[in-house]
Image (cartoon, rainbow, N blue to C red):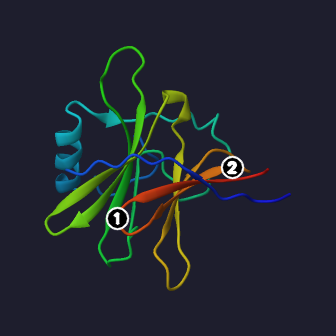
Amino acid sequence: MRSARVPVRVLILTGALGAPGPRPPLPAAVRQVITAHCAGWQFAPVDSARVRGWRPGDRPDWVSGDFDGDGRRDYAVQIMCPTGKMTPVERLALLARGTTYQLFVLAIVPATEAYFFHVSSEPGSPPELTAVMDEERSLLYQWKGDHFEEFFLGED
């Protein structure tokens, strides 16, 4: 078994999910940037029976961490924008920039591809954001200085 890191396309946009366990709500400043991007948004539902391999702490709605290594709390969310019958899921990263957030579109996928987020970190490096697909596959979103790149991690 080998692991592969394969670069995948990334769309960048600047501008501005029912979840397990109690925790503080998504900050108002983050919600404002998301609403400017997509009025009427809602967290994307995730079928936890279909998505296997998630770990305690993984979230279907939003996670936070310092994704760009600048010492500030950033956020990643999965939302649905009301666009009609086939509403896609958008995976977004929101990086702290002063009193607001810069929004990056990580992926726009069919609703069947809403996965759990996982944040992990190693000493001396920014936390890594992944979307867990199942026990063997996930998508890694890595900050590259001015954009995110998506890598497929899994079996060849």
Going by the image, does 143 lie left or right of 74? Answer: right
Residue 24 at x, y percent in the picture:
30, 57
- How many C-alpha atoms fall within 10 Å of the one at disc 2: few (<14), some, or many (≥20)? some
Q: Is residue 69 above or below residue 33?
A: below
Q: Given the current orientation, which residue lies at the most extreme left position?
A: 99
Residue 148 at x, y percent in the picture:
43, 58
Q: Nearer the viewer, residue 65 or 9?
A: 9
Q: Nearer the viewer, residue 144 or 57?
A: 144
Q: Given the current orientation, which residue lies at the most extreme top position?
A: 85
Q: Report the disc number at residue 146.
A: 1
Give the number of the mark in front: 1 or 2.
Answer: 1
Going by the image, does 122 lie left or right of 16? Answer: right
Q: Of label 1 and label 2, which has the lower sequence position?
A: 2
Which residue carries the number 2 mark?
137
Q: Report the disc number at residue 78.
A: none
Residue 97 at x, y percent in the picture:
20, 67
